[in-house]
Image: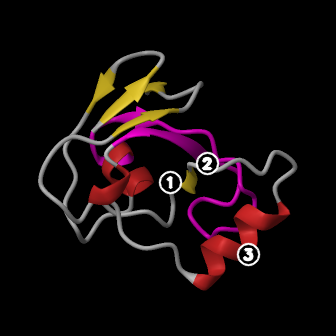
Amino acid sequence: MVVEPGGERFSSNADDSVIEAAWRAGLSWPTTCWGQADCGACAMEIVDGRELLSAVGELEAARLADLPRRQAGRRLACQARVVGEGTVTVRKPGVRPR
C-alpha cells in the first residue's frame, strides 16, 4: 500500500482494514472515531488498485453518502481491506509516522 502525498508504504492483509494496517506499521492516520465509520475523517481517494479492495458495505456506503465532498473513488480506511495481490495507491493528506 502506498499513501500519497507523503509516499508512506506499508503492507496489509485481508484481516486488517487499511487504517489498522497503517497503525500496525507505525503511521498516524486522521480519524476521530477510531475505526467505527462514524466520522468519515479517514476517507481516502483511491488512485490505483481499486479492484484489490474489498467491496463497499452498507455502513461504509451510508457514511460516504453523508460526507460533504461526495466523489467517486473515495473509501473509508476503517472499512476498506486489501483483498487482492498487488499495490493499492491512495491519496490521504495527514498520514505520517507517529
The amino acid at mark 3 is Ala
Neighbours of disc 2 within 10 Å: few (<14), some (14-19), many (20+):
many
Magenta residues (range): 23-48
Percent x, y of residue 10: 24, 36
Percent x, y of residue 48: 36, 38
Query: Label 2 near label 3: C-beta < 8 Å?
Result: no
* Residue that appears at 36% across and 69% down: 54
Mark carried by residue 9: none
Neighbours of disc 3 within 10 Å: few (<14), some (14-19), many (20+):
few
| Distance between mark 1 and mark 3 Cα atoms | 14 Å
Query: Label 1 near label 2: C-beta < 8 Å?
Result: yes
Disc 3, SS = helix
Q: Nearer the viewer, residue 52 or 41?
A: 52
Foreground mark, 3 or 2, reads 3
Q: Is residue 32 magenta?
A: yes
| Residue under label 1 | 77
Magenta-highlighted stretch: main secondary structure? loop
